[in-house]
Image: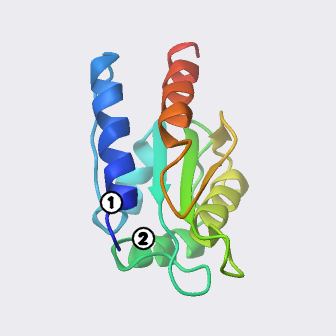
Amino acid sequence: MFGNAEDVANDLNDMAINKGFETSISEMNDVSLDDFQQMDQVAVVTSTTGHGDFPTNGDDFWSRLEESQLKLQNMKYGVCALGDSSHDEFCGAGKKIDKHLDKLGANRIIERQECDSDTEGSREWSDKFLSLLMSR
């Protein structure tokens, strides 16, 4: 909603390109479930708004994903969640999608990064995430 998640995603995308990855970057609402199911390496970067909710550019995707029964056993993923610990549902959107991807059989290759009120830790997380993808 304020651009921090977009900045983190763009930085991660630049880092991935520099390491030789072929990348695609999209707002969550722009990703169909059919396309999502075909992805094998996914970084989800999301902020949280309201009471642990997804931002407007991820709301529709989350609604579709939450109701789906996709089989994601071929997906390796990581989640970088942005939030504010002064709210009850700190990083709620990131926690929701992380838990649901695991439920759908996706393979979490790195623990969820939770950034509190800024992007601190996201660059280190991104670098480690990409290194783990390269080693698998």
Query: SS for tag 1?
Result: loop
Whether residue 27 is situated above or below residue 106 in the rendered picture? below
Horizontal side of residue 116 vs 33, given as left or right: right
Q: Nearer the viewer, residue 98 or 85?
A: 85
Q: Which mark is residue 61?
A: 2
Q: CB atoms at circles 2 and 1 under 8 Å apart? A: yes
Whether residue 85 is situated above or below residue 33 in the rendered picture? below
Horizontal side of residue 112 vs 30, given as left or right: right
Find residue 24 and report its horizontal and vertical position in percent: 27, 41
Q: Which mark is residue 129?
A: none
Whether residue 116 is situated above or below residue 120 in the rendered picture? below
Q: Residue at x 57, y 76 (%)?
A: 67
Disc 1 residue type (three-letter): Val
Q: Residue at x 36, y 47 (%)?
A: 9
Q: Spatial distance from mark 2 to mark 1, Cα to Cα?
A: 7 Å
Q: Quadrant of the N terminus?
A: bottom left
Find residue 114 and report its horizontal and vertical position in percent: 63, 54
Query: SS for tag 2?
Result: helix
Q: Which mark is residue 31?
A: 1
